[in-house]
Image: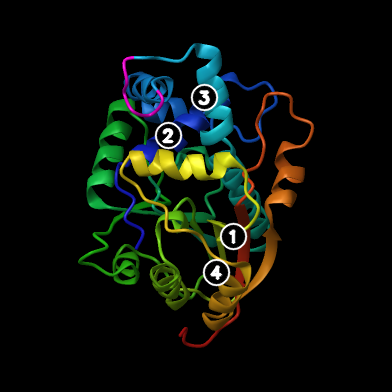
Amino acid sequence: MVDNRESITAKLCAFARAWHSNKARNKIYDDYLAFDMMGKEEYDEIYDIIRHGFNRSENAFSNEDTIEILNEYIAPIPLSRIHFSESRLKRFADENEKIQYVICGAGSDTFSFRCDNPDIEIFEIDHPDTQQYKLKKIKQLEWNIPENVHFVPVDFEKEKMTDKLVQSGFNPEVRTFFSILGVSYYLTLPVFADTLSQISELSANGSVLVFDYPLKSGNFPRRVYRLEEITRSLGEVMQGGFDYNEISRMLYSLGFQIDTYLNPSKVQKMYFSERTDGLRAFENVSLLSATYTGGFDYE
């Protein structure tokens, strides 16, 4: 399930968004509230983890080498997937008068405070501990929570996401945009399918689902396996990825039709072409959006 507690990898992704917004001249995606949401203390903590090679050794890289590591391993995936997701969300909102937006495993996502569209009803789903941590930060920042934003704590080991969403005011008859980013890497296909099955239960026809996922096989360079080593050393084990055909069949069985699919080469062309800062698409990560039209049981 989407049990996105305050993991180190989640913080690394938040750091990448904050760093890119503050430092990059040619921005792939500008999360201008990411640094404020993290706070300087946590930002410096994560930078220090990267600088010490993710293992808190006494030996530290130079600032230049640390930035190179960030560009090589940490920044490309979160920057491209959030750009893809929020661009698709904008198109979805433009096509519909009023919509709902469900952020699964919201973590330090700042969309709720960057959004200026009151016709988007936002539901942030997360583990209760993570959500309380975020709400505490919001209070410290003295940010006002908009009336169209709902925080939905879900203990995925004990509670059903669908029940908690409905209890929080979610309307299954309203077209909804579901994002589930950075989650599939750590789940087997049956577990991921169970998560998407719950989403399909809540989906009105015309709703949209967006997620990123790693490919199971291919001629991948060393950095793909190095990233897996890094996350494993941080206590978060990747599960090996999926094939496009099995993802496609699973989505079809749940009533979703793929409307946009970016394989790694297309991600490179769309978000990273002609860059000079070393940022480039990960060779095993795809981005996908699918529209709900009604479906069958997944086996």
Q: Nearer the viewer, residue 226 or 188?
A: 226
Q: Could you classify mark 3 by the number of other residues whose Cα lies within 10 Å: few (under 14), some (14-19), or many (20 or more)?
A: many
Q: Residue at x 27, y 62 (%)?
A: 156
Which mark, by number, is residue 217? 1
Question: From mark 4 to mark 1, how far is it between C-alphas?
Answer: 35 Å
Q: Earlier in the sequence, mark 1 or mark 2?
A: 2
Q: Quadrant of residue 107?
A: top left
Please report whichever mark, 3 or 1, sits nearer to the chain's N-terminal start. Answer: 3
Give the class, few, some or many, for how many residues have Cα within 10 Å of label 1's Cα (few <14, many ≥20).
few
Q: Look at mark 3 in the image and give the residue it sits on.
A: 19
| Magenta span | 53-58
Q: Spatial distance from mark 3 to mark 2, Cα to Cα? A: 10 Å
Tell me the tag on residue 12.
2
Q: Which mark is residue 175?
A: 4
Q: In this image, 282 relative to 9: left or right?
A: right
Query: Mark 2, residues whose alpha carbon is within 10 Å: few (<14), some, or many (≥20)?
Result: many
